[in-house]
Image: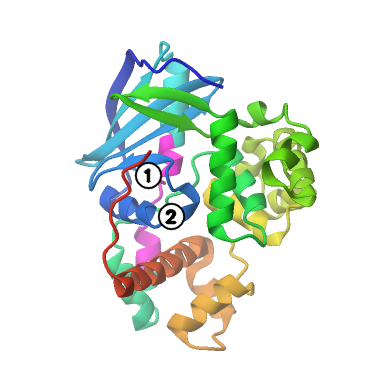
Amino acid sequence: MTTSLTAPATVSGVLPAAQPFDLRTSLRFLQGFGACKGDQIMTEDTLTKAIAIGGQAVVFKVSPCDGGVGYELSSDRPIAPELRDAVLAKIDGYLSLSDDLTGFYAQAAGDHPGYARLVKALWGLHQVRFLTVAEIGVWAILSQRTPKNVSTALKRRITERFGRTIGYDGLRFQAFPELTDLRQLEVDDWLAIVKNARKAEYLACLVEGLLDIGEDYLATASYGQATKALRGIKGVGEFSAAAILLRGLGRMDFVPLEMAAFADATAKVYGPGYDNQRLRSRYGDNLGYWAYYLHTGLGALRDEARGPVACESGR
């Protein structure tokens, strides 16, 4: 799906952020976030990215400002107030601007010294989510038992074939397709893209399932009810459901700590055999932030050991 590469309609303003917040920490995270590689253009203090909402593509550019982020929205069609509000809500969720980290920081201050050091190094980082539920849902299926570079290439192929294209500042941006865009695909269409019959079926079921459940329900139902609804979609297991709720909807109150990805990371900081119940008791509803800082901090340490990495410049 392609729109014009001109973008005359613009809206600008400021989105507040719960403090402390440092957009630069979010940008550093995105530099190493392979799942969204090539989806945006970044400098040291700006992020430019496209989103599709209600059949319209919008480019947004954010930059640091006092108390939050400055934004500019641009589209090739007029930006109605309802669309503006919807895009701003997505940006707020994408960068977790409204998340209050003061409680989490207080909990982390008395934690293991190794973890406290990770938190100090990432101070001001709010969780960077996937921009839409469609994107995290598709990624959760694509990445099952698949190397990240292969999953990323498949995600890019889906974006190029079914996303919306728009121009901004002389550059071309592509927005990941909406669920309603993907609903037109049959299993055979997915198979032509992913070359895997099981995943093709899962992707078709995922799109229908997410549309049937609704994003509002997943965001507001109890965690158990939301998980049950997601697990009812063929192909969505425990890890995929947790990823959709955590990385797509910012549901920070639960993490499957017993799964290998979390157990291995925990052992690196706390030592083997650490009691997960102690973590749950300490962090409570902030357990998702504990996990986010753990993985992000360990990833930053690995990157430092490898040496400097060039900032992503986009497509």
Q: Is residue 260 visible?
A: yes
Q: Is residue 232 visible?
A: no
Please state which amino acid type lies under the numbered disc 1: Leu
Question: On the rendered structure, is 296 left or right of 263?
Answer: left
Q: Is residue 121 magenta?
A: no
256 to 276, vertically: above or below: above
Identified at 43% across, 13% down, the residue is: 80
- Tell me the tag on residue 97: 1
The span shown in magenta is: 91-106
Residue at disc 2, secondary structure? loop
Above or below 23: residue 53: above
Q: Position of residue 97 (x, y in %)?
A: 37, 44
Mark 1: few, some, or many residues within 10 Å (few <14, many ≥20)?
many
Q: Is residue 94 part of the magenta span, yes or no?
A: yes
Quadrant containing the N terminus is top right
Find residue 33 and name its label.
2
Name the kind of residue labelled 2 in the image: Phe
Residue sitting at x 42%, y 43%: 38
Tell which circle, 1 or 2, labels the residue nearer the N-terminal end: 2
Residue 77 x, y percent position in the rendering: 42, 11
| Residue 186: quarter of image | top right
Nearer to the camera, 8 or 24: 8
Give the quadrant of residue 73.
top left
Q: CA distance from mark 1 to mark 2?
A: 19 Å
On the image, the x and y values in percent for residue 148 come to 55, 58
Name the residue at 57% across, 44% down: 155
Quarter of the image containing the C terminus?
top left
